[in-house]
Image (spheres, rainbow, N blue to C red):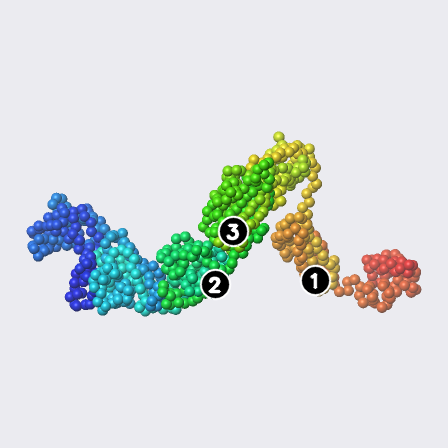
Amino acid sequence: MVLSVFAMSAAFAGGAAAAGDQSKVNDGEQVINDDGRIFQGQTGVIDNTSTGATVDVSGDIVELEDEDGNWLRDLDVKEYDNGDQYIAIDTSELETGTYNVTEVADSGKFTFDVRTHGVEADFADETVNNIVGTDSSVTSFDISSERSGIHTNVSADGLDADDLMKIFADGNTTDDGLSAAELQDDHSILFVDEDNDEIVLEGRQSFEANFSTIEAGTYNFTASVSDTTAEDTAEIEVIDDEITAQFAESTFVEQRSNIAEVTVELDNTDKAYVQIGDEVEANYEINLSVTDVDEDGEVTLYVDTTNVHKLASGDTSINNEEVTAAGDDTVSLQSVTTGDLNNPLAAGDYELSIALDAQFNDERDTAYLTLNPREALAEDAVATHTAPDSVSDLEDFEDTTVTETDQIANDDELLVTVDTESLHAYFDGETDLDSLEDVYLEIEEQDSSLNADPLVWTTNSTDVGATADEDIGAHVSIVDANQSEGQVILKVDYDSFGDSLEEGQSYDVRFNVDATNDFATDDEEGETATTAFDLEKPYVEWDDSAAEAPATAESELTGETNIAPGSEIDTRARSTGNFVMPATVEVDGDRHFAAQFDFSEYSAGTEFELSATGPHGTSDSVDSVLVEGEPSDDGGVSVSADAPSSVKVDADASLDVTVTNDGDEEATTNFTVEINGEEVDSDELTLAAGDSVDKSYDFDTSEAGDISWSVSTDDDDASGTLTVEEEGENGDEKNGDENGDEKNGDENGDENGDEEKNGDENGDENGDESDDTPGFGAAVAAVALLAAAMLALRRQN
């Protein structure tokens, strides 16, 4: 409790300036009755007016006890000026609970309860500006409590009483001489205490707070209930940044009959005023107030070009969504200078203006809203679609399989799309076509019975009895009207028609813009887009190939249907005493279905029944038999490797590997490479069908010897050995070209030639195996013999 009667009396005794009526502030004193209540912080008074009490104490000590009778303290007995006695109990230090007072009860003990209550103080905005004359400097200070009739003392660090007056009394100060009545009636201010720099606000409500004269900074406000201990704080930041209010574009362009979007950008303010049109230039002008509730710095206005012309002078609110705001943001009508037109806004440029005040004295930006003439419907703008699931909204439409087609199986969904860049304002907020008359859908049978006109169903109720037979407006719902995508999606609930569509019949579908429509491009004949569809009896049917099934692990059996792609069909292969195999499959885009069964454990010649059950009561069954199937060859993942068989020491040598997926589907395999028993690569490879990957690994040829290598996948492997040889291991310089030096002559030298010591063509070196061949072992001699034989053969040729 910040103020009390006693504290205020003491303050005024010093002559401090004040405003308002101090006597109206709750003084904190409360007469309590037996079994009554008092709030913590108040001063409880027990006197002869208290119900259940008689205060006539002479010599006895009056005690305050807790609920259990334990003594807490003695109470003083005082006298009024008339001599009557009273007892005052300060409750600020008492906890909540029940208390007893002795010596005063008419019977038993005098009992009362101490309670607490809360108070909450909040500013509607975290930040305000201090620019004079703008709404961005104004917010609300909200005080709430479960207790009624409260008075709240408000103070703030860094602000004096005059500052608080300016904030809560619309710029006035104590020097302005406002009467107590004016303060209370106009601003709900009961009292202003300049000595303690606080004001007292009346009631639990929202108080307007204007910070246009307050210096920038962060201020912590304290709100204390004047007669109890309830207290709360609230913080607000005052900034002096420049306010920006502007249009996101210099020109906003839209077709007539659509919803035009106008976006304004706000910085350091959440409120602005927008004017559309100009009384002089366009004979049309409305003023709007926009609020950026979600505080994202922008407000997007949706202007319905089919309705906004209907706003009339004197209108104080937007009743028919002529203008709306996106998301949580709001727009309200300020005034209509010129409106109430007979026709929708004409094509042309409409000036836009944005300001920070309703009088547009503080104008910040201008732009244009350009309304272009509406484009006519294309003759092929309409198409029919089907779907397996019920479609009632855009989410359903996007979640299911939608197929454009002119063949509709009876009981499947019938959807109609209209590709149009205009007319979207007509569908905004509507759930079906029932309320639309000059924009409508028609369905007409192509063939009628003898001596009868074709039946016509229409969503235009005014045509029924004239050019149409039945109004179906309530049965053609709007799934979505997406202006940005240029498409309207309609669902036709043909099962609900009074005169049902018939299986085996063909129907024309027409989407019309009547010549009487305000936006019709042809005011004599109107516009029509047309398509057609056949309503067929639904069926599912196995192909002839299903009469035999290969006895393999992936035996696939196929069929066809006319029900919507995406529909599920339950199939089953059943052989008495052998197997029952169910499989649920989905109809593909070509309206075929394929079921796969594992017959690998059963012998050729096994007979079974093959059945299929689809939606709408469709079914088919055939007798089939297992036949020998070709073994499955999925190709696997193969590996090929290339490496030299021998190299010299320090020569370059590498192992080149290619891994290939030879199958028809993506495959994953483990891949390992080892060189000389050491794993140099280990990986898991995933390859698309037919794809391959190349890898290369260098050998260490720094020392002579054999180097073994191996490469493997899950399906294949390769291995080999590389021999690293010392230099000259296959012949030294004496062997001349290739195997010898110049002394050996061509190829194998003169050792195999005509010299006498070589004897005949094969020479004595090819004689008995002995040590008679100096410098040669048996293996080298064999090589020489082979070389001689090859030379002799060449000479013969």
Q: Residue 88 at x, y = what percent?
A: 14, 54
Marks 1/2: CA–CA distance: 84 Å
- Residue type, label 1: Thr
Q: Residue at x 44, y 63 (%)?
A: 282
What residue lies at 8% left-to-right and 53% top-to-bottom?
84
Numbered disc in front, either 1 or 2: 2
Residue 241: x and y, percent? 38, 68
**Who is closer to the viewer here, 391 or 637?**
391
Number of callouts in the render? 3
Report the disc number at residue 701: 1
**Label 3: element kind:** loop
- CA gap between label 1 and label 3 equals 91 Å
Nearer the observer, 524 or 161: 524
The residue at the point 61 percent across, 43 percent down is 591
- Residue 182's image quarter? bottom left
Query: Residue at label 2?
Result: 349
